[in-house]
Amino acid sequence: MARKPLVLSERARRDLVSIIDFYTAEASFDVARSYSSALRAEFDHIGRFPASGSPRFGPTVGVRDVRSWPVRGFPYLFFHAERGDRIDFLRVLHTSRNIPTSLRDDMEE
């Protein structure tokens, strides 16, 4: 199966920078690099299988086709939506956050 390109939203880019900065400062560069590697593997999977993930949060925030997928080995979910020939990467959120509220706030911006 051909891999669909992943389009990173500005909000998702900020999430990723914040997470990498956090791991670099609070854990180590190696942990930050491990997170980046895990995320790349998950991006590759979603690029090949865009219907992967749970649709649970989409109806909650009123956005059709939003799916969540875990970052293996880390307490984060990333949110994506298949849009024709691409996949929009919307957010990365820590699993301890109030995810519906965080996503809903983004949709209202």
Image (cartoon, helix red, strand yellow):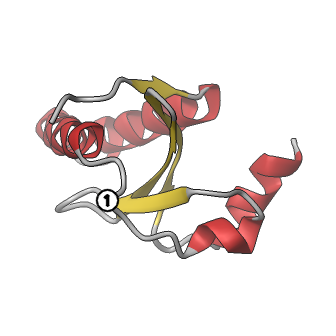
Residue 19's spot in the image, x, y percent?
41, 42
Image-based side of 20 in relation to 98, left or right: left
Residue beneath label 1, please?
52
Looking at the picture, does residue 15 appear above or below residue 51?
above
Figure quadrant of the N terminus: top left
Image quadrant assignment for residue 45: top left
Image quadrant assignment for residue 64: bottom right
Q: Callout 1 environment at 10 Å: few (<14), some (14 to 19), or many (20+)?
A: some
Image quadrant assignment for residue 11: top right
- Residue at 71 percent across and 74 percent down: it is 60
Closer to the camera in the image, 78 or 46: 46
Q: Secondary structure beneath disc 1? A: loop
Mark 1 is on which residue type? Ser
Residue 14's spot in the image, x, y percent?
56, 31
Residue 31's spot in the image, x, y percent?
16, 44
Image-based side of 62 in relation to 18, left or right: right
